[in-house]
Amino acid sequence: MFLKGKSAIVTGSTSGIGLAYAKALATEGASVMINGFGDEAAIEAERKELETLSGAKALYDAADMSKPEQIAAMVERCHAELGGPDIVINNAGIQHVSAIEDFPPEKYDAIIAINMSSVWHLCRAAVPHMKAAKWGRIISTASAHSLVASPNKSAYVMAKHGVAGLTKTLALEVARDGITVNCISPGYVWTPLVENQIPDTMKTRGLTRDQVINDVLLAAQPTKEFVTPEQVAALALFLCRDEAKSVTGANLSMDGGWTAA
Ligand code: NAD
């Protein structure tokens, strides 16, 4: 349990990749603050399971990642109740698939706020605590779309390129403070976020469900397999180790070869 005594905030951890991060960190003994939307009873069951896995306290914070003041309050609550935060995983994200001329401006604003600006606000609030502790790990879930584009995902691709840019900038700023800053760029991971964009893609491109899965989603992924949330979480766990202290400012692909093409 190499993370015993450390605390972690994982945004968007009521589902998908975020939930896998939270479990992986707890399995190594970290106190985890989970965040995201969902069914109250399911979230409470998850929180309790994390305490069982870690033997440490786990908390849920309902901060909306589109609201900077709620993000700052979540960090201060973590500091007061769990210490740290020593580890921050920026993971909350939403998607909308549409041609730019039909893209609702309010969806654009929400994607930029939740997928990109929240990362800046959370880092801004957490870095002073990490500097004081002379240790920190900041990990963001970017995407293959932080490196390459796909049509009809204008806001998402912009936001993820922004996360990759912040990762590099902040890594340089805190390089002498014992803090590493990295992002992980998965290809398609089978989670509700991917499942939910199938109907829109079927409509936008006039395809069947199977065609969307095989000819659109997995078309770009040479392995023809979805990445799993557990694989992404295992890479994040490695980044928290002392052996990974020289890995900083990196955008680590886990995309079945997609961006090698
Ligand atoms: P998901 O839909 O399963 O989970 C998203 C999480 O974000 C949920 O917990 C949800 O409640 C939370 N969330 C949404 N809006 C929020 C808000 N305003 N405030 C706080 N929390 C909010 O999706 P996922 O696939 O697990 O995605 C997680 C991250 O991984 C996202 O940033 C996504 O862009 C990225 N990603 C996913 C894939 C993939 O194929 N699934 C690929 C690359 C990157």
Image: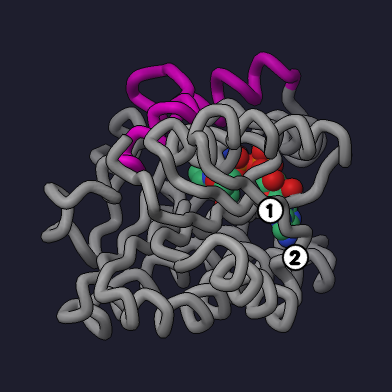
Residue 99 visible from this viewpoint: no
Q: Is residue 38 above or below residue 216?
A: below
Tell me if the residue at label 1 has its CB under 8 Å from ligand 1: yes
Query: Is residue 238 found inside the magenta-colored segment of the image?
Result: no
| Range drawn in magenta | 208-237
- Name the spot of residue 20 as percent of width and height, x first: 53, 33
Disc 1 crowd rating (10 Å Cα; few below 14, some 14-19, many 20+) is many
Confirm whether residue 49 shows in the render: yes
- Amino acid type, mark 2: Ala
Percent position of residue 108, x then y: 73, 69
Seen at 16% across and 80% down, the residue is 176
Measured as percent of width and height from the top left, residue 261 is found at 27, 38
- Kindly identify the residue that appears in the image at 48 percent across and 37 percent down: 26
The residue beneath circle 1 is 35
Of residues 171 and 212, the one nearer the viewer is 171
Q: CA distance from mark 2 to mark 1?
A: 7 Å
For the N terminus, give its image quadrant.
Answer: top left
Element type where label 1 sits in the image: strand
Tags 2 and 1 touching, CB below 8 Å? yes
Which of the colour schemes (rainbow, by chain, secondary structure, one colour) is used? one colour
Viewed as shown, does residue 193 lie left or right of 243?
A: right
Foreground pick, 234 / 146: 234
The percent position of residue 75, horizontal first and vertical second, equals 59, 72
